Image (cartoon, rainbow, N blue to C red):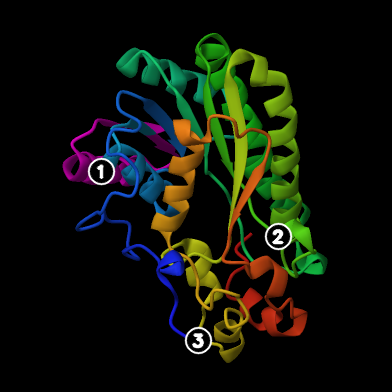
Amino acid sequence: MSQLGFACQPPPDVDTDDCLPEYSYLFSPDILKGKVAFITGGSSGIGFRTAEILMRHGCHTIIASRNLQRLTEAAKKLSVATGQRCLPLTLDVRQPQMIMAAVDEALKEFERIDILVNNAAGNFLCPASALSFNAYKTVIEIDTLGTFNVSKVLYEKCLRDHGGVIVNISATLSYRGQALQVHAGTAKAAIDSMTKHLAVEWGPNGIRVNSLAPGPISGTEGHRRLVQPHPEAQNLFRNIPLQRVGNKTEIAHSVLYLASPLASYVSGTTLVVDGGAWMTSENNFPALLGIASHSAKL
């Protein structure tokens, strides 16, 4: 294979939940100047990098999850690296009352919220036959119900009257029935459907709603669980058309696009950011089964 051309080269990234040591702008640095973003699951992985990239483009952020210590540490890193304000707030996306309290606190601090990134999620590899009732329910509650809960609260408290953007982090799992992912695939398929419904209903309020479906992304918990010391796991990425996994900065750039005025007429769609992986990657149930025992936690 020839080396990747300039259009396929990944931007620099770091695997850890730390800010980039340096950053080259592809978008205008002030494209989100004065905006405020609310990001669930914002203390690590894709959520952390998304917060960083939005902040580097002039946006203040609220990062929200269940672990206050991790949130506080992340917020300090983000503010130091970008010079923007970052408010850490604890919430459980399954608990509407907690979400309401967090949004009230965020509005008290910033007086506005323009962008919502629904990134909180739960997942693991497990065959359907071994999946407990509670495990399936938990993933649906975090991914699907959590996305609706936070979206509805933000709509009622801010977006309905002022407009804004919602970006739901989805997945390609349901496109062909990914082995060991019936729980997450079902949850993410529902999110993609929810995205369309909300885009239709809330569009007249000046709200754009889109989904973003990442492929295999380095430096994330999902990638760490999948790339175990198994030859089968390493082979999973050889069939990706771009011949590599993606990185968190690439996903954050895609969120930036959807959240920015560059996507002013984009609503109700799912942007797949996976290097073409879902169309060509193996769906080898026996091979994946050897990895699942290291990944199923519930």
The amino acid beneath tag 2 is Leu
Residue at position x 27%, y 56% in the image? 18
Q: Which residue reaches farthest bottom?
A: 231
Q: Could one spot residue 91 in this view of the protein?
A: no
Q: Position of residue 94 (x, y in %)?
A: 60, 34
Of mark 2 and mark 1, the one earlier in the sequence is 1
Q: Is residue 265 above or below residue 230?
A: above
CB atoms at circles 3 and 1 under 8 Å apart? Answer: no
What's the CA distance linking mark 2 and mark 3? 23 Å
Residue at position x 75%, y 84% in the image? 286
Q: Is residue 53 above or below residue 92?
A: below
CB atoms at circles 2 and 1 under 8 Å apart? Answer: no
Residue behind mark 2? 173
Residue behind mark 3? 229
What's the CA distance linking mark 2 and mark 1? 31 Å
Give the magenta-colored segment's residue range.
63-90
Residue at position x 51%, y 19% in the image? 100
Q: Is residue 113 left or right of residue 214?
A: left
Q: Position of residue 297 (x, y in %)?
A: 60, 63
The amino acid beneath tag 1 is Leu
Q: Which residue reaches farthest right?
A: 129
